[in-house]
Amino acid sequence: MKRAFILSTLVAGFLSSAALAEPIIYVAAGSANKVLAIDPKTNKVVNEFDGIDNPHALVATLDGEYVIAGSLNEKKPSIGSNAVPESTIYIIHPAHGHVMSTMPAPGMIHHQAITPDSRYVISTHPTQGGISYADLEGEGGVKTMKTGPGPNYTVITRDGAKAFVSNSGNNSISEIDLKSWSVSRSLKGGAGPEHIVLSKDEENLFAINARAGKVSVIDVKLGDIIKSWDVGKNAHGLDLSEDGKTIFATSKKSGVLVAIDIEDGTRREMSLSPSPYHLETIAGTGKIYVSSSKEPKIWVIDPKAWKVVSEITIQGEGHQMALGSL
């Protein structure tokens, strides 16, 4: 089977059926070696996809037909003692219920992002000091480029022209031109930036500074930090409210979910135990999903009522999540 999985001839036919499909939340379940599918209406696991080696990263195509997961595990190739260790990108077809194709990638995969046209999947490779971009159409395969030490997270502008990659090893955020696949400039990211998210107007970046326990606000045009907010020790998860007015973040050490009003900086806090971890606001559901790094569960939060409305028992740990359809 070809390493570059061909989507171009399939997408047009799937768009109409995907529009009728029910929304599903996909979760990379780490040590369970599978991807889980959660129904946001019932907050229950309704499907699982096996045979995926320690998935930490996960995205879905715009039409909802494919889920792409990346493995945190890396292995030395059998040929060449100096060869770069490889991990695996898995392309899952949920309707068929299994992995359709795999692609090798250099070094462990931490997080992923997908371009708005669903053509390229960008993976961060912390041990390799850069990213890879997998071409899901044509014969492009997987190509790589350097960004900086310890790349962690990627976000992409709505027009697909630029991506931003946090480099936790040198406190920077790389701006990438997605036409030339080159770093166009470097922005300040605060101490060890990890998870990042763009503001609704795409004028600011928000970056988790895990060691400092803060969220930094970076002016994209200036490339500099303009303010920061306290989250708590070992800050980790980060996302934006659907209306773009609130930033949500988690602190594993402090055991809290924090909501910060972007306009005035006012802060709300909710205790979650143990160790609130990855965080996703899922568009159209009116809910926030927060996993625990210590227990196999996901909290479902109503951000308006500011309370836990459900807990979902899962296998493994909840890492990156994405909205798709089944």
Image (cartoon, helix red, strand yellow):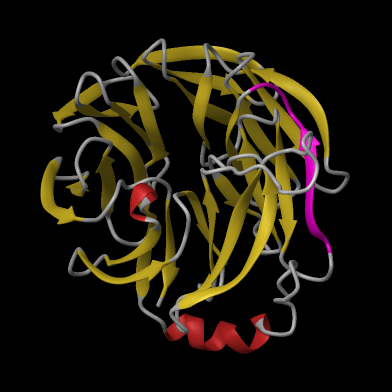
**Would you identify the image quadrant in which residue 276 lies?**
top left
Q: Where does residue 229 sit, x and y in percent of width and height? A: 38, 15
Give the residue at x 15% y 33%. Answer: 272
Give the residue at x 40% y 34%. Answer: 238
Q: Where does residue 98 sit, x and y in percent of width and height? A: 47, 76
Give the residue at x 58% y 85%. Answer: 14
Q: Is residue 100 visible?
A: yes
Verify whether residue 146 appears in magenta: yes
Q: Along the horizontal axis of the image, is 25 left or right of 184?
A: left
Q: Nearer the viewer, residue 13 or 263?
A: 13
Q: Which of 195 and 314 is in front in this view?
A: 314
Q: Can residue 157 be seen in this view?
A: no
Please tell me whether residue 52 is drawn above or below residue 254 in the rendered image.
below
Q: Residue furthest right?
A: 180
Q: Along the horizontal axis of the image, is 143 left or right of 32?
A: right
Verify whether residue 58 appears in magenta: no
Q: Where does residue 183 sit, x and y in percent of width and height? A: 81, 31
Q: Where does residue 179 sit, x and y in percent of width and height? A: 85, 48
Q: In which quarter of the image is the N terminus?
A: bottom right
Q: Which range is magenta?
A: 140-149
Give the residue at x 82% y 71%. Answer: 138
Q: In which quarter of the image is the C terminus?
A: bottom left
